Image (spheres, grey):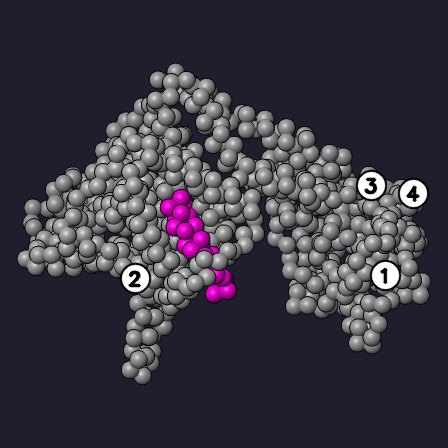
Amino acid sequence: MKRPINKFILKTLLFIIPVFVFFEVLFRLGFYPVITNSTFFDVKMLTVQKQHVKNVKLLAIGSSVALYELDSKIITHNFNMPYYNFASWGLQITDTRVLLNSFVKSYHPKYVVLCSSFGDFIAPQNDTYLNYTSASDLIKDKFPELFYFKNYNSIYRVIRRKIQEYPPEADNWGGALLRVKKKGLNNDKLNKHDIFPTKYTPSNYAALVSLSASLKAQNVKLIFVEVPVKASYANTDRAKQILQAHFNKCEAIVERHGGLYLNYYNTTFFTDSLFLDQVHLQAAGAMILTREIVGDLKKVIH
Amino acid sequence: MFYAWWDWRFLFLLIGCSLLNYFLGIGIAKSNNEQHKRFLLWMGVLQGLGCLLFFKYYNFFIKSFISAVAAFNIKPDIHTLNIILPLGISFYTFKTLSYLLDIKSGKIKPTYDWVVFFSYIAFFPCVLSGPIDRPKTLIPQLEKKREFDYNQASDGMRQILWGLFKKIVIADNCASFADPIFAHYSTLPASSLLFGAFLFTIQVYADFSGYSDMAIGLSSLLGFKINLNFDSPFFAQNIADFWRRWHISLTSWLTDYIFTPLSIYFRDYGKAGLILAILLNFTLIGIWHGANWTFVLFGFINGLYFIPLILRGTINKKKKADKDGLLPSLSVFLNIAATFLLVMFTFVLFRADSVSQAFDYYRRLFSMSIFSSFEVTEKVNAITTLIAIFIMLAAEWLQRAKEHPLQIDFIKGFALRATIYFALIGYILSFSAIKNADFIYFKF
C-alpha cells in the first residue's frame, strides 16, 4: 500500500515544486507580490526586509509629505541612533495607526516622528494594509515570497504592476527628496485644492487619539510634525480658520497624550517657490524644513 | 472543525440535527408499528423542514404576508427577525430527510455507528454546498475500511485542478464583469445587458460546478466516490435535458421525493396532472435557492418551459448528441443554443435583487440598443476570460463522455499529459481574478 502513496506524493510534488520555483524566480527578478493596493508601500516593505532593518530608535512615518520632506542625511548626521523613514504615498492617519501598531512591535522605536498635513485626514482607511500587518514575522522577515500565496494575485497583475506602476527608489533610510522640474507639468493639477474636512476626517482624528494613547502606553515618544502648506492654499479667511482649527485639534490630541506637537506652517518662511504643489516641498524646501525639525528635536532627543 | 471554522455558532444546530436524526433512524427501523414509524418520520421531517423554514424563509414569509395584507389596508403587528442563515442548512437538511425517508421505505438500513452517521451529515467536502449525496451511496463507503487507490486519488487531483480553473479563472472573472453590469444596468445599452446575462449564466455554472468538482475531487482523494453533480448542462438540447444535467444531486432528490409522489398523485389528470407536478416541483427548486420571489419565479418559469415538451410527449425522450463527433451537427447546435438562451433568460431573475428589477432588466434588454457597441474597461481580463470560457466549453464538449475533461488517460505519453496540466496551472496562476468572489451556492 505504501508504494502507490509514494508515487502519488512524488507526482504531486512534481507539479507543485515548479510552481514554487517559478515564484522564487519571479521574486528575484523584482516582480514583487501584490500585498496592499499601494505599490510604493509594498516595494518599501520588501526593501526593508532586504536591508535587514532592525531596532529603529528614531522612526519616521506618514504619507508622501513625510517621505519627501525629511532629508535622511541631515537626520542621520545629527542623531546618533538607528533611523528609518517608513512613510508611504497616500497613508491616512487611520492607516498610520494600523501600521504603527505593527512597526512598534517589530522595530522597538524610542521616538516616532509623524509628519502630517491636512491631506492625511480626508480619506477612509485602506484595509489592504492589514494584509501586511496580519502576516507573521516569518513571512515579513524571512520569506516575503510567501506573500504571493497569502494574498494571491495573478501573475498578469504582478507583471502589469511592475511595468506600469513601479515608483522611484528611496534612499537607504527610506526617504526621498523631490527634484521635479515644473516645466511642462499641469499647473491646474499642481494647484488643485484637496477638499478638507471630509466625512472621513472624524475617523482620522479618532485614529490620532488611539495612536497617541497607544504610543504613550508603550513608552514611545510621539513627535507630531505639522508640515508647511503653500500660502495659496489658505487664501481666504474661511480656509485659514479651517486650517487653524485643524492645527488646534491635532495639537490638543497629541499633547493630551504626552506627545510633542511641532507646527511649521509659516507662509512667509516657506514661500511658494519652495513647493511643488499645495503641500509637497521640493528638495531645497525639504532640507530647510528638516534642519528646522532637527533643531527642535535636539531639545527632546538626547 | 471544518464547519466550526466557517461559523462555530451553527455547529450546535448541526450536531443537534444529526443526533436527533441518528436516533430517529434507529427508531424507525426498530419499530414494528407502522403508526409509530410514521410518527418518528414526521418528527424528523418537521424538525428538518422547521429549521429550514425558520432560518431561511421566516423573514420572507413575514414580509410577503405584510405586503399581501397591506393591499387591504391592514397593518399586522408582526416583525421580521435578525436571523443569520446557518451554512449549508439546505444541503444537510435534505441529507437527513432522505436518510429517514429511505429507512422508512425500506431502501436502506440505519447505521448504528454514530461516527459514520455524523460523518455522513457533516462530510466535509460536501457539507457547505453539496453535492447532496444519498445515504445509500455514501454511508456504505463510510462504513467500510478504505485503502489508498492511486488512480482514484490522481483523478481526484485532476478534478480539483479543473474545478479550480472554473472557479477562480472563469467564475470570478465573469463576476468582475457581470457585477458592475447588473449594478448599473439602467445606464447601459442592451448589448451590455446581454453580455452581462451571458457572463452571469457562465459564472453560476463555473462557480457551482467548479465547487462541485473540487468537492468530488477532494472526496476521491479521501477514497470516496461521490456522484456527478453537473453533466455538461450547456450541451443540453432541451430544458428537460438541461435539468437532468444541472445540479443533479438536487434535481434527482426532488424527483425521487417530490416529483414522483406528486405525479403519481395527479396521474388521473393526464398531461394536466403532469404539468401541475412539474410546476410544483420547479417552484420548489426555485424557492430552495433562496427566500425571494425572484427564485420562485425562476423555478416557475423553468417549469413552464416543460409544457411544450409535455404536450408533445417528448419530455422523457433523451436527445443524444453524437458521443464521438468533433463538432455538433447544425440541428444539435441550434437546440443547444436555444436551450442556453432560455436558461440565460431565467438567470436574470436568479441574479436580480427583486422581480421588478428583473423585469426592468428584460425591458431594457429588448431594445434597439442591442445592436450598439459597448466599452469594456479591463480588455486583457475580458479577452483571457472569454478564452477561458472557450477552453472550458471546448474541453467539456470533447470530453462529454467522461466525468470531467481532465480524464485524459487515453493520451499515452506522460509528458504530453503533464504539459496539459502545466498549461492549465499556468493559466490559473496567470489570469485568476483579482477579487475572489464567495461561492454563490454558499448562501443557499
Left-right relation of B210 to A98: left
Contact check, label 3 and label 4, Cβ < 8 Å: no
- Badge 1 crowding class, 10 Å Cα cut-off, few under 14, some 14 to 19, many 20 or more, is many
Q: Nearer the viewer, mark 1 or mark 2?
A: 2
Q: Do callouts 2 and 4 point to residues on the same chain? A: no
Determine the CA span between mark 3 and mark 4: 14 Å
Left-right relation of B402 to A75: left
Q: Label 3 is placed on what type of residue?
A: Asp
Q: Label 1 is placed on what type of residue?
A: Pro
Query: Mark 2, chain letter?
Result: B
Q: Nearer the viewer, mark 2 or mark 4?
A: 2
Q: Residue at x 46, y 23 (%)?
A: B418
Front residue (pair B437, B221):
B437
Left-right relation of B55 to A299: left
Q: Do callouts 3 and 2 point to residues on the same chain? A: no
Query: Mark 4, chain letter?
Result: A
Q: Percent position (x, y) of residue B99?
A: 21, 45
Q: Is residue A291 visible?
A: yes
Q: Residue at x 18, y 52 (%)?
A: B309
Tag shown at residue A77: 4
Q: Percent position (x, y) of residue B166?
A: 43, 40
Q: Residue at x 84, y 56 (%)?
A: A276
Q: Label 4 is placed on what type of residue?
A: His
- Residue annotated with mark 3: A171
- Residue annotated with mark 2: B297
Contact check, label 1 and label 3, Cβ < 8 Å: no
Left-right relation of B364 to B320: right
